[in-house]
Image (cartoon, helix red, strand yellow):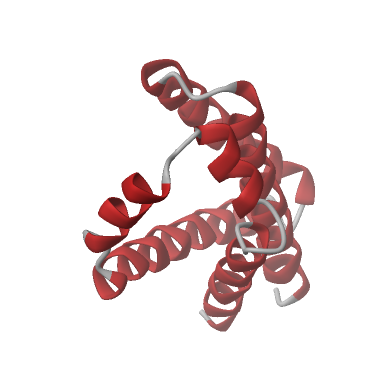
């Protein structure tokens, strides 16, 4: 259980750094071609407890899935390929229906791949 909590926190930290103002956030905003007015309007609807709560829950679920996969395979890290492929397939579907450009897709997918790998390493080292 502790490994799931630590992996979840690590994933949240990776997301915070990845999408921070000094990393990929400026690139994403310029690629999305969003005006300051649109960003301010979206941020006015932002509910931190709700949004971060949902992200934490989803990351904890992902960490639990990784934990289960690693337990079934006796810690074989090659099993991490499955959550990565699942997330990739899900994001491709989202990309198609939201018309997200390829650069944005790579930024989002890169963060998730790094998070899943780190989560897998943390959990496997704590088993």
Residue 53 percent location from the top left of the image: 32, 70
Q: How many marks?
A: 0
| Left or right: 123 in relation to 94 | right
At 49% from the left edge and 55% from the top edge, which residue is drawn?
62
- Is 116 above or below relative to 81? below
Residue at the (26%, 53%) spot, across then down: 41
Quadrant including the C terminus: bottom right
Residue 89 in the image: state x and y as whole percent: 52, 25
Relative to 48, is 1 on the left or the right?
right
Q: Is residue 127 above or below residue 33?
A: below
Q: Residue at x 66, y 58 (%)?
A: 18
Query: In the image shown, does 2 or 38 lie closer to the viewer?
Result: 38
Quadrant of residue 29 in the image? top right
User: Relative to the observer, which residue lies in front, 66 or 46?
Assistant: 46
Residue 83 in sight here:
no
Against 68, residue 95 (above or below) is: above
Residue 54 percent location from the top left of the image: 31, 62
């Amino acid at each position: 259980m502790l490994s799931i909590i630590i992996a979840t926190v690590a994933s949240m930290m990776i997301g915070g750094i990845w999408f921070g103002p000094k990393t990929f956030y400026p690139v994403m905003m310029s690629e999305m071609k969003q005006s300051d007015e649109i960003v301010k309007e979206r941020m006015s609807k932002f509910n931190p407890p709700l949004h971060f709560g949902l992200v934490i829950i989803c990351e904890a679920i992902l960490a639990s899935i990784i934990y289960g996969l690693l337990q079934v395979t006796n810690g074989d890290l090659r099993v991490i390929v499955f959550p990565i492929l699942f997330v990739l397939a899900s994001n491709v579907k989202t990309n198609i229906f939201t018309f997200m450009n390829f650069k944005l897709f790579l930024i989002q997918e890169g963060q998730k791949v790094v998070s899943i790998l780190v989560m897998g390493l943390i959990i496997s080292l704590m088993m």
